[in-house]
Image (cartoon, helix red, strand yellow):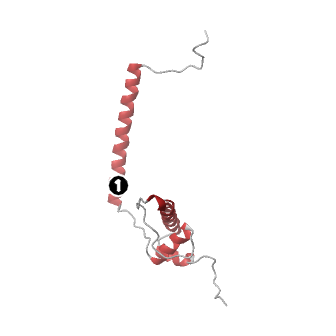
Amino acid sequence: MAQGRNTLMDPPVEDLLDKVDSKFTLVALGSARARQVNSYYNSLGEGLGKVVPPQVTSVSGKPVSIAFEEIAAGKATFSRPDPEEEAALAAAIADAAEAALAASQESDESAEIFGTLTVSDEDPTAS
């Protein structure tokens, strides 16, 4: 007879939580990897080869199950960004947002110079 388990999931959630720092990280990592696995299966006939195929042999064909098996095997991992790198990235994003806002304001000024286009609902042939 098969040996009983306390959980319905294989690998058990407790084993998965040992591989990450929190349950939120587990959910984020599992869902991101499951989307990649799903993209891989959806692009098989296209020959693009941009998405990494599943890294474990699984009896389940479900992307989330494959992702959790990869996490349990240590094939899918995460890394936290360095606070200094994160601050530099935030500064670069802020600079890009300021540049986009400045470009948007310039295009609004040019619209005022050239006027605005309005479209009427009236039939042009009815007069």
State whether residue 12 is above or below residue 92: below
Query: Taking 21 as reference, is 121 left or right?
Result: right
Front residue of 29/20: it is 29
Q: Position of residue 39 (x, y in %)?
A: 49, 60
Q: Position of residue 54 (x, y in %)?
A: 47, 70
Give the residue at the far bottom of this rendering: 1
Q: Position of residue 1 (x, y in %)?
A: 67, 90
In the picture, the quarter occupied by the C terminus is: top right
Give the residue at the far right of this rendering: 1
Tell me which residue sits at (43%, 70%) in the image: 77
Front residue of 100/46: it is 46
Tell me the residue that label 1 is attached to.
87
State whether residue 115 is above or below residue 32: above
* Amino acid of disc 1: Ala
Give the residue at the far top of this rendering: 127
Q: Position of residue 100 (x, y in %)?
A: 37, 38
Q: How many marks?
A: 1
State whether residue 125 is above or below residue 43: above
Q: Which class describes the residues within 10 Å of circle 1: few (<14), some (14-19), or many (20+)? A: few
Question: For the residue labelled by badge 1, is the local secondary structure a helix, a strand or a loop?
Answer: helix
Tell me which residue sits at (35%, 62%) in the image: 82
Quarter of the view holding residue 110: top left
Front residue of 13/121: it is 121
Tell me which residue sits at (63%, 84%) in the image: 5
Tell me which residue sits at (51%, 21%) in the image: 118
State whether residue 49 is above or below residue 58: above
